[in-house]
Image: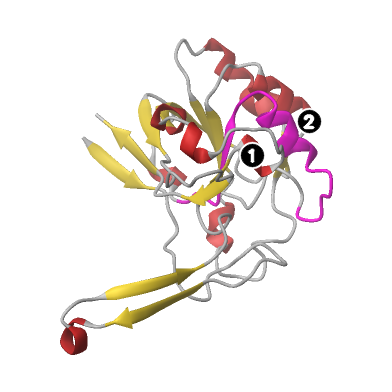
């Protein structure tokens, strides 16, 4: 088995969505001084490589503690959307031919802008048609190497809602998608089991056998 890490490292001062609180990771105890190491983490649940669930936008949706691990693991395919301004149905149409497919990961190459001022500006987004198509594939979720399926200034989060309405989870800020095959690999994005949690950073990986 070969495992590809699809996750940006978590560190103090890492990029966050505009308006979010900064990440602070502070070592509180040190092996040489205290005999053990301990670290305090301060960040919201939608930083770095993370998952959004329906509870992110809907008050009556189940929290992470009610969702099973199987919601975050399954067979996946990568769709090449490099240089696309909008991810639309023509990029995705061939997915209808797959017999078994749980996650669609959209590779735009935008992760090359991580830790730059460009990352949260004018990144590729999904069209409404693409969201409706993905919603009809009976997937567990979709993944992006961008900050969001919606534009950064979106207020109605229309694409989020279109995907979450179909029971999908949304994994944002993936990286290294170019190291994966186009299909027939397992994808995992397991979050912490946070009571009433609506999202969480994940250690996303792709596994080939």
Q: Quadrant of residue 56?
A: top right
Residue beneath the point at 59% across and 38% down: 53
**Label 2 element class:** helix
Residue beneath the point at 50% across and 28% down: 103
Which residue, as the protein is rendered here, is positioned at the far right?
A: 155
> In which quadrant is the C terminus drawn?
top left
Label 2 close to label 1 by CB (< 8 Å): no
Could you tell whether 126 is left or right of 189 in the image?
right
Magenta stretch: give its range. Answer: 152-175
Query: Is 39 above or below relative to 120?
Result: below
Q: Quadrant of residue 3?
A: top left
Camera-near label (2 vs 1) is 1
Mark 1 crowd level (few <14, some 14–19, many ≥20, 10 Å Cα): some
- Residue 55 marker: 1
Q: Would residue 40 be visible to someone looking at this image?
A: yes
Who is closer to the viewer here, 43 or 13? Answer: 43
- Disc 2 from disc 1: Cα separation: 21 Å
Residue beneath the point at 52% across and 58% down: 48
Q: Is residue 169 magenta?
A: yes
Query: Is 186 above or below relative to 189?
Result: above
**Label 1 element class:** helix
Q: Would residue 84 be visible to someone looking at this image?
A: no
Residue carrying label 2: 128
Could you tell whether 112 is left or right of 179 in the image?
right
């Amino acid at each position: 088995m070969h495992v590809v890490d699809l996750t940006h490292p978590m560190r103090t001062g890492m990029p966050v969505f505009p308006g979010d609180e900064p990440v602070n990771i502070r070592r509180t105890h040190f092996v040489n001084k205290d005999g053990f190491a301990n670290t305090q983490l301060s960040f919201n649940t939608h930083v770095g490589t993370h998952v959004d669930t329906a509870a992110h936008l809907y008050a009556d949706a189940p929290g992470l503690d009610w969702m099973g691990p199987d919601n975050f693991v399954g067979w996946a395919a990568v769709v090449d959307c490099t240089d696309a301004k909008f991810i639309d149905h023509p990029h995705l149409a061939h997915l209808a031919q797959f017999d078994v497919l749980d996650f669609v990961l959209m590779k735009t190459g935008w992760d090359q802008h991580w830790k730059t001022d460009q990352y949260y500006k004018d990144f590729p987004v999904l069209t409404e048609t693409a969201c409706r198509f993905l919603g009809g594939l009976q997937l567990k979720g979709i993944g992006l190497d961008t900050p969001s399926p919606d534009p950064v200034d979106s207020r109605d989060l229309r694409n989020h809602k279109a995907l979450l309405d179909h029971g999908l989870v949304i994994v944002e800020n993936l990286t290294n998608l170019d190291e994966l095959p186009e299909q027939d690999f397992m994808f995992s994005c397991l979050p912490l089991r946070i009571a009433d949690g609506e999202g969480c950073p994940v250690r996303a990986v792709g596994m080939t056998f």
